[in-house]
Amino acid sequence: MLQAPSQKALVPFVSVENMMRLVHLIGIETMLAELADVIEADFRRWQLFDKTPRVASHSREGVIELMPTSDGDIYSFKYVNGHPKNMAQGLQTVTAFGLLAEVSTGYPVLLTEMTMLTALRTAATSAMAARHLAPKGAKTMAMIGNGAQAEFQALAMKAVVGIERIRLYDIDPKATEKTARNLAGCGLTITACTSSQAAIEGAEIITTCTADKQYATILSDNMVGAGVHINAIGGDCPGKTELHRDILLRSDTFVEYPPQTRVEGEIQQMDPDYPVTELWKVITGEAAGRRDRNQITLFDSVGFAVEDFSALRYVRDRLNGTGLYQDLDIIADPDDPRDLFGMLQRANT
């Protein structure tokens, strides 16, 4: 674990370049598996965390959000945006950065990029949930939506769940080609499909992850057979869904934090009393997950601040001895805490 701020109050900062170096140093599948374990450990102590729906600023172009939480000792927040139209300008749909701080002093102890880290933690969360909800021995996943998340999702399911085959579909064939190319040689059997219907044939896990900010029907009711696990991660803001509501009527739905998911997730289509199970209760044994081979399980994941907290503390702990960070001078540290103005005056000399 990185130490608390020194007398100079320098804050470790992980740039995009250093985050990528850290991933390669650890190994991406190892990192995804370790992240899944850290996230699960924090879900087991879910009740310790401050919980609030993310603070969102919506516009016609997209959304900018803050995602805060604390376990009483450490505080974290993430700044993240979601702008689907960015792709047309050659920009990322999602960008992010995050911070950890000591609750006891309020001093930051880590600042890091989180565009890359969010993709990793989202995939690790999906795989962690599938470990509890997917059919035992599942070997095939359909990946519908082959954008920036697709490869991370595939590798996390391989590392954590044991998936061996990925069936890809995207309305843009170039996205599927990109994903297949990036996953070549990773040990997965890759099949590019020409429709979502073709992609889900024989799949025990179906992951939907599309970018358009609209009510969409990526999966219709007649496409989903008994016994599958649906990992729905694309519906993540008001007015954006991917599944026909009849699928939800046939499914047992699991969520992170209901007050947030009912506004942003697939269940925004449903009545306010539509029953859901919080995933942490499955992990701790307080609620049932998958009960039988015919059950349809749905993880309606919109991303929650505890997952970011887990990812940030994982990175903080993994930085030891790597040198893959810079010390930033972003905290004023006068010799006399009462003499901030004197510090300013001395800087002029």
Image (cartoon, grey):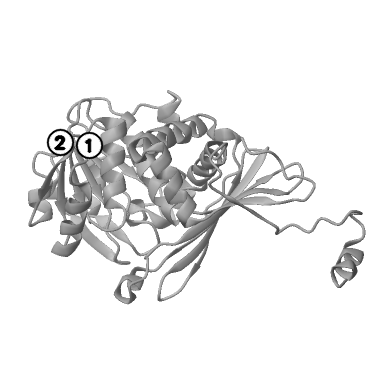
What residue lies at 18% left-to-right and 34% top-to-bottom? Answer: 164
Three-letter amino acid code of the residue under disc 2 = Ala
Quadrant of residue 123 within the rendered picture = top left
Residue 152 visible somewhere in the drawing:
yes
Q: Which mark is residue 226?
A: 2
Give how far across and how far down residue 118 sits, in percent: 43, 51
What residue lies at 19% left-to-right and 37% top-to-bottom? Answer: 187
The N terminus appears in which quarter of the rendering?
top right
Q: Earlier in the sequence, mark 2 or mark 1?
A: 2
In this view, the residue in front, 9 or 141, is 9
In this view, the residue in front, 12 or 50, is 12
Q: Are marks 2 and 1 in contact (CB under 8 Å)?
A: yes
Residue 255 visible somewhere in the drawing:
no
The C terminus appears in which quarter of the rendering?
bottom right
Three-letter amino acid code of the residue under disc 1 = Ile
Q: Is residue 344 left or right of residue 176?
A: right
Extreme residue in the top direction: 285
Give how far across and how far down residue 79 sits, in percent: 53, 59
In this view, the residue in front, 29 or 82, is 29
- Which residue bears the numbered disc 1? 296
How many residues crowd around disc 2 within 10 Å: few (fewer than 14), some, or many (20 or more)?
Answer: few
61 up-or-down from 336: above or below: below
Q: CA distance from mark 2 to mark 1?
A: 6 Å
Give how far across and how far down residue 286 sits, in percent: 44, 25
How many residues crowd around disc 1 within 10 Å: few (fewer than 14), some, or many (20 or more)?
Answer: many
329 up-or-down from 301: above or below: below
